[in-house]
Amino acid sequence: MHVTPREYMTGFCHVFALAAHRRTGWSMMAAMKGARKGEETFRGYGDIIHVFVVDKDGNRFDALGPGDSPEDYEEEMEARLGETVWMLDIEEADVAELARMGWLRLYDEDDLSRAAEDVLEVMAEEGMDIDLPQPTIAA
């Protein structure tokens, strides 16, 4: 699969987020809609709108580069969609499970390798520090 930057924002955001997480160690979050705010789990509750990482400054980072805080993004999406939107911390295993369940598009390690290159390209374009830990491979 070859993914363009636009596709990272329209269905493959989890691949970019997972590659960024592996490259930087930054935590991942999922923006959910139609869910009950504050639920402990996403399984069975609502739809995933977007997956991204939270950078060292506490801001959203995705294929468009650094953005606003997760809280501000939540408010923006609620206003845009007219629905309850909430943020949930997710782990690499969650992303894999959601892909297997069909909630997210399937991906493989080759996809993540290409996405890791795109992560570095976005960081360089934004003037971000790319001298970070080396990528990790899931066990």
Image (spheres, rainbow, N blue to C red):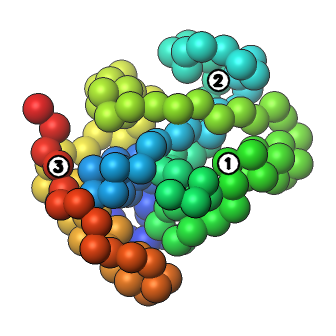
Nearer the observer, disc 1 or disc 2? 1
Residue 98: give x, y in percent of width and height: 39, 27
- Residue at image location 34% in from the left, 49% down from the top: 25
At 69% from the left and 54% from the top, the residue drawn is: 69
Q: In which quadrant will I find the C terminus?
A: top left
Q: How far is mark 2 from mark 3, CA to CA?
A: 30 Å
Instruction: Give the image location of residue 45, x and y in percent.
Output: 62, 17
Q: Position of residue 113 (x, y in %)?
A: 18, 60
| Quadrant, the N terminus | bottom left
Contact? badges 2 and 3 (CB < 8 Å): no
- Tell me the tag on residue 70: 1
As drawn, 102 above or below 73:
above
- Tell me where residue 41 appears, x and y as whole percent: 55, 15
Give the number of the mark in front: 2 or 3.
Answer: 3
| Mark 1 vs mark 3, CA separation in Å | 25 Å
Quick one: label 2 or label 3, which is nearer the N terminus? 2
| Residue 136: image tag | 3
Tell me what residue is drawn at x 27 percent, y 58 percent.
23
Q: Amino acid at mark 1?
A: Pro
Q: Which residue is mark 2?
A: 46
Q: Secondary structure at mark 1?
A: helix
- Residue 122 visible in the picture: no
